[in-house]
Amino acid sequence: MRSFCDDARIIISEEQVSADLGGDAAILNLKNGVYYGLDSVAARVWNLIQQPKTFRELRDILIEEYEVDGPRLESDLQNLLNQFADQGLVRSAE
Amino acid sequence: MKPLAHTYYVYGITLHSEILLALPEHGCGDLAHIELRTAPASYFVQALQGIALEQVDGSWYQIGRLPDGSSYLRWEGVGEFLISADGRHMSCRQFDRATSESFQVYMLGRAFSFALVQLGFEPFHATAVVIHGEAIAFFGSSGFGKSTLAAHFLSRGHKLLTDDLLLLQRTTNGVLAYPGPSRIKLFAKPARRFSLDTGGGVRMNDLTRKLIIPLGGGTNCSKAAPIRVAFSMAAPREVFAKQRIRLELLPPRNAFLELLKNTFNEHLLGAERLQRQFIQTSLLVNALSVRKLYLPRDLDKLSIMEIAVLSCLSTQPQEAACVN
């Protein structure tokens, strides 16, 4: 699993389309025709990275919004972004 | 080129046809225009030169995609169709053994769905009835009981909007459901139970006893109707015979998946179409209340189902309801 450093800029792929569904979200990867469902937390992250953000910026925003300890949030965020990257939905730029 | 002597209205589309069809000659058809012409066998033979036909899994029709983007469909014993890449032109040939009723079912269903998708619309596999001026849709694959449900509502004095193919359009005021052909497809036994006249019914094809039953006498609605409520029918394998009827309000994400999987056309899979389908479906989901309907295959339970369904039209949505 890759590890995103604080300054890694998370950029969403242009080859996808997404929709808000009552707080959750769905994404269609136009490259492979696969659909993804996001729960409300993942949808919030996805919404935030509609404009490129660094890992630090994402973490700092989310730590304010969710009642979760820092290390847990960081681990979950790394995991989520890795899943996005594995599916070709995002890329990172240092 | 032969003149298109007839003009019909179906699914909100104006259909200019060379041949007579069992469709209304008055109505609303402002969504798009399609031209339908007949063609000889040689026309299709020439068009298909070098094209490999694909036999669709689990069905008995063949599909071919031509380099210019047009689509070819063929049902043995029924007919063949060629739909232009822009969806505005359909060519057809009815095979000798086919009845006109059967031919029109496949033409205005599967074949027409290619034209609709190419024109930018998203047809669904659903049946809809109109109750007190409002449409209710039942989504589901073939054999899930959509038409049987609709026949029950017809027997209760309500009207059929469309059977099997449903076109929805999001408007500034909500969602509109458009009327289909005035016929319903049912087996003889449930049709007789709901007092539908099977005398005029014709078998869909040689492989089934399901009948194409024309509707008249005010049993069908020929105008678009607003729709707020939809039901996605659980597959027969998901529902046990003695299970209670259950309605489960779906969160938008699940409703989205239910609508997506009930697309009427799962063959046109280009990125542009998938993107459009995705966006249109998400807009619909945010405007409709969608419930999963678990209905045992028991005609005696349809009256109870009716009560449950009608209650969804008038009340605040409930998370889930079990009905005895």
Image (cartoon, coloured by chain):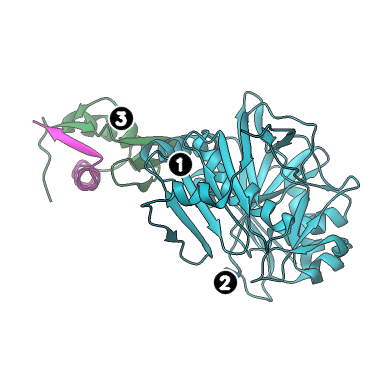
Chain colours: A green, B cyan
Discs 1 and 2 share one subunit: yes
SS class, disc 3: helix
Q: Is residue B266 visible?
A: no
Residue B72: x %, y % from top left: 49, 49
Q: Mark 1 points at which residue?
A: B70
* Vertical arrangement, residue A29 with respect to residue B172, above or below: below
Residue holding disc 2: B237
Q: How far separated are the C-alphas under marks 3 and 2?
A: 41 Å
Rounded to the nearest whole Å, what is the CA distance between mark 1 and mark 2? 37 Å
For marks 1 and 2, give the one nearer the viewer. Answer: 1
| Residue B168, horizontal then vertical, whole percent | 62, 38
| Badge 1: chain ID | B
Instruction: Indicate the secondary structure of the residue bearing disc 2.
Output: helix
Rendering quarter of residue B313: top right
Q: Which chain does the residue under circle 3 lie in?
A: A
The residue mark sitting in front, 3 or 2, is: 2
* Residue type at numbered disc 1: Ser
Magenta-colored stretch includes residue A35: no
Label number found at residue A48: 3
Q: Main secondary structure of the magenta part?
A: helix
Q: Are marks 3 and 2 in contact (CB under 8 Å)?
A: no
Q: Residue at x 47, y 52 (%)?
A: B45
Quadrant of res B194: bottom right
